[in-house]
Amino acid sequence: MPELTPVITQDEIQRRISTVAQAISADHQGRELVLIGVLKGAFFFLADLARQLTVEKIKIDFLQASSYGADTSSSENIVLKKDIDIDIRGQEVIVVEDIVDTGLTLTYLIDHLQEFGPKCVKVCTLIDKKERRQAKVKVDYVCMTVEKGFLVGYGLDFAENYRNLPEIYHMQL
Ligand code: 5GP
């Protein structure tokens, strides 16, 4: 069993989500919004965030990407595993991500979504992890920032395990 150290409690996660939900709601009052969750890690986050938004009309869809190959320093090694189904042309879109780490996945996904002609694509992440950032990516809404380390729980996995943990833990690899 790997060593798991609690980093953020359930209450703290919900408090931070409330703050971000208020900011998103204030920025989009009376308008329509499309939330696009990045599978699988963001599924709890998107579910909790969406239920706290007070924006007039919200649509929800999902994307899934995965990286392959030994060279993890390029977004060319990222493939799309699941695309969106709904039409986002002319829509205000927020990509809901679990963790922005190198930023390569997000760069790839934003470029992909731009091809559908949305009005704009913003980013909301549960965790902004600064240390390994390679791609310049603008993150509009951040629930929490960490410098480094591998996190699990609240949707975040290690080899598909631990997603169901209600809190976020640091995992000693
Ligand atoms: P990026 O392309 O920004 O390097 O990759 C982001 C993705 O890597 C996240 O969506 C997440 O799936 C995974 N990832 C990055 N850091 C962590 C971490 O600390 N824990 C877990 N479980 N996944 C991470």
Image (spheres, rainbow, N blue to C red):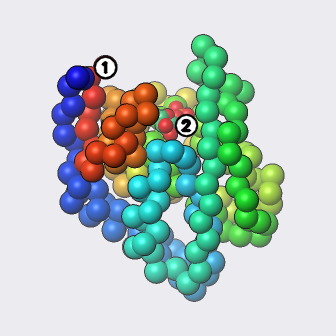
Q: Which residue is mark 1?
A: 173
The picture places residue 5, in percent across and down from the top left corner, at: 18, 34
SS of the residue under disc 2? loop
SS of the residue under disc 1? loop
Q: Residue at x 73, y 64 (%)?
A: 86
Quadrant the C terminus occupies: top left
Q: Residues within 10 Å of mark 2 (few under 14, many from 20)?
A: many
Q: Residue at x 71, y 69 (%)?
A: 91
> Which of marks 1 and 2 precedes in the sequence?
2
Q: Residue furthest top?
A: 70
Q: Is residue 52 left or right of residue 103?
A: left
Q: Is residue 40 left or right of residue 85?
A: left
| Mark number displayed over residue 103 | 2
Q: Is residue 147 left or right of residue 68?
A: left
Spatial CA distance of label 2 from label 1 is 21 Å
The picture places residue 74, in percent across and down from the top left corner, at: 65, 24
Amino acid type for the residue under numbered disc 1: Leu
The picture places residue 161, in percent across and down from the top left corner, at: 37, 34
Amino acid type for the residue under numbered disc 2: Gly
Q: Is residue 53 above or below residue 120?
A: below
Ligand 1 neighbours mark 2 (CB distance < 8 Å): yes
Between tags 2 and 1, which lies in front?
Answer: 1
| Mark number displayed over residue 123 | none
Between 14 and 123, the one nearer to me in the picture:
14
Q: Is residue 39 visible?
A: yes
Q: To which quarter of the image does residue 95 belong?
A: bottom right
The picture places residue 25, in percent across and down from the top left corner, at: 47, 76
Q: Is residue 92 above or below residue 31?
A: above
Q: Residues within 10 Å of mark 1 (few under 14, many from 20)?
A: few
Quadrant the N terminus occupies: top left
Q: Residue at x 80, y 57 (%)?
A: 116
